[in-house]
């Protein structure tokens, strides 16, 4: 294996230059402020967790975890998402706090991908977890909040696809009873949004024509409120009926929030079917071909940390949002140069300190003995000052 070159970085990581960081921090600040206004308190968890606790409880596949050993030989992982670490905290440090708990977070996370174009091994997530309430009301709340945070981040055109894993589980149990492997294969096709593969898989199955048409028909269960009634007529399975009722109640609450226009019911959208237990959703920007947020209900996770409770939440993929709002304007700070000689140092520093008390000002100080001239103190046609390759809105000189 060759030694890395001096400027080489590991695959999947990147540097963020100042202008990009300004936009990224602006997105983060707006989103976290929005979450706080909805009653969510921010939490920070460690970058490193034990594999045997958080690592195994995570929704991330084992092969995508970054693993390392501590000095005692125990396996650690770099956090791959924030839901499992927060569940650990809810079951320990917050075990005496009454439900419901509303928690928010922003952190970098790590996932080991093969060398695929566009896949990053380190990226940023900002999200919320609402723990201790299993009602459609709070499911609708997190969806409405996801919409509000996407707007706060600067996205103008996006849609939320809303599904329910219980509906598909019920439908498959009714139409493919006991055929678990075949059910899982169909789910994998839907998880990858591979509808062609889903149809091909159906053709391979030994099914009567009516059942095959019924299973293929779910690909058309996408739309607005009308999908609720259509979905009810497809199956009589009790789990499927209960799931679609829950989904329709979520829709009713979203209408009251006034955000149902952003939502598309899509009963082929199941998220990670081994992790989520109820409704799931993903947010798509018109400018990108992949999700900018995802979330759903995961009622089994908290039991792994000794405090069984229903829970729901979502995460924004902040890096992807940054791509979608790459033209987002960033309020440029007013740049001021305070130049001084040795004799004017005290006055210059006092001036700089006063200027830094103002909002929206960035102040630099520079000693200029022997290199200062009147040309540097003369603004150009745009009223800007130029000195040593930099541009300033204001110039102060203390000689």
Image (tube, helix red, strand yellow):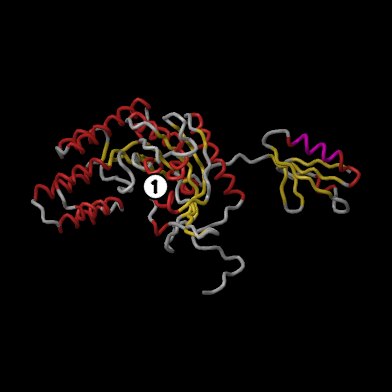
**Furthest residue to the bottom?**
1
Whole-percent x and y of residue 177?
14, 48
- Position of 371 with respect to 258 (left or right) is right
Q: Nearer the viewer, residue 20 or 235?
A: 235
Disc count in the image?
1
**Furthest residue to the right?**
343
- Position of 383 with respect to 180 (left or right) is right
Numbered range of the magenta stretch: 347-355
Q: Nearer the viewer, residue 67 or 221?
A: 67
The C terminus, quarter of image: top right
Provide the secondary structure element on which disc 1 rests.
strand
| Vertical side of 52 occupied by 136: above or below | above
Whole-percent x and y of residue 220?
21, 44
| Vertical side of 350 occupied by 121: above or below | below
Is residue 38 something that shows in the picture? yes
Q: Nearer the viewer, residue 148 or 44?
A: 44
Whole-percent x and y of residue 68?
50, 60
Q: Is residue 337 magenta?
A: no
Classified by dominant secondary structure, the portion drawn in magenta counts as: helix
Which residue corresponds to the image point at 26% horizontal and 45% vertical from the top-left? 268
Q: Is residue 349 magenta?
A: yes
Give the residue number, with chain letter if any, for mark 1.
Answer: 291
- Position of 5 with respect to 266 (left or right) is right
**Furthest residue to the front?**
72
Q: Quadrant of residue 365?
A: top right
Q: Quadrant of residue 142?
A: top left
> Tag 1: Cα neighbours inside 10 Å, few (<14), some, or many (≥20)?
some
Is residue 34 something that shows in the picture? no
Which residue corresponds to the image point at 30% horizontal and 31% vertical from the top-left? 251
Q: Nearer the viewer, residue 375 or 295?
A: 295
Whole-percent x and y of residue 390?
72, 50
């Amino acid at each position: 294996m060759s030694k890395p070159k001096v400027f080489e970085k590991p695959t999947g990581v990147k540097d963020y230059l100042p202008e990009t960081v300004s936009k990224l921090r602006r997105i983060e600040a707006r989103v976290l402020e929005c979450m706080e206004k909805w009653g969510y308190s921010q939490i920070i968890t460690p970058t490193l967790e034990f594999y045997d606790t958080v690592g195994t409880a995570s929704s991330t596949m084992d092969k995508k975890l970054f693993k390392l050993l501590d000095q005692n030989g125990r396996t650690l992982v770099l956090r791959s998402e924030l839901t499992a670490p927060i569940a650990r905290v809810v079951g320990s440090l917050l075990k005496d706090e009454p439900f419901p708990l509303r928690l928010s977070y922003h952190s970098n996370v790590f996932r080991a991908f093969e060398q695929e174009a566009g896949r990053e091994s380190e990226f940023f997530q900002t999200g919320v977890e609402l723990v201790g309430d299993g009602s459609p009301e709070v499911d609708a709340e997190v969806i409405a909040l996801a919409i509000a945070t996407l707007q706060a981040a600067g996205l103008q055109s996006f849609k939320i696809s809303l599904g329910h894993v219980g509906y598909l589980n019920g439908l498959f149990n009714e139409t493919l009873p006991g055929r678990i492997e075949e059910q899982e294969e169909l789910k994998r096709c839907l998880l990858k949004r591979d509808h062609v593969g889903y149809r091909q898989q159906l053709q391979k199955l030994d099914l009567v024509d009516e059942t095959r048409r019924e299973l293929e028909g779910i690909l058309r269960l996408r739309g607005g409120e009308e999908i609720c009634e259509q979905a009810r007529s497809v199956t009589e399975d009790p789990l499927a009926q209960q799931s679609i009722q829950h989904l329709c109640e979520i829709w009713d609450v979203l209408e009251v929030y006034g955000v149902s226009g952003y939502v598309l019911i899509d009963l082929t959208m199941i998220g990670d079917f081994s992790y989520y237990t109820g409704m799931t959703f993903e947010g798509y920007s018109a400018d990108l071909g992949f999700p900018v947020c995802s979330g759903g209900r995961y009622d089994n996770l908290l039991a792994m940390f000794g405090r069984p409770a229903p829970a729901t939440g979502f995460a924004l993929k902040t890096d992807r949002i940054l791509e979608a709002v790459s033209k987002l304007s960033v309020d440029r700070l007013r740049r001021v140069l305070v130049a001084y000689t040795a004799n004017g140092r005290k006055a210059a520093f006092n001036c700089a300190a006063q200027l830094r008390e103002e909002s929206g000002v960035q102040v630099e100080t520079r000693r200029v003995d022997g290199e200062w001239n009147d040309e540097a103190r003369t603004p150009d046609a745009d009223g800007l000052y130029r000195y040593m390759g930099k541009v300033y809105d204001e110039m102060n000189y203390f000689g």
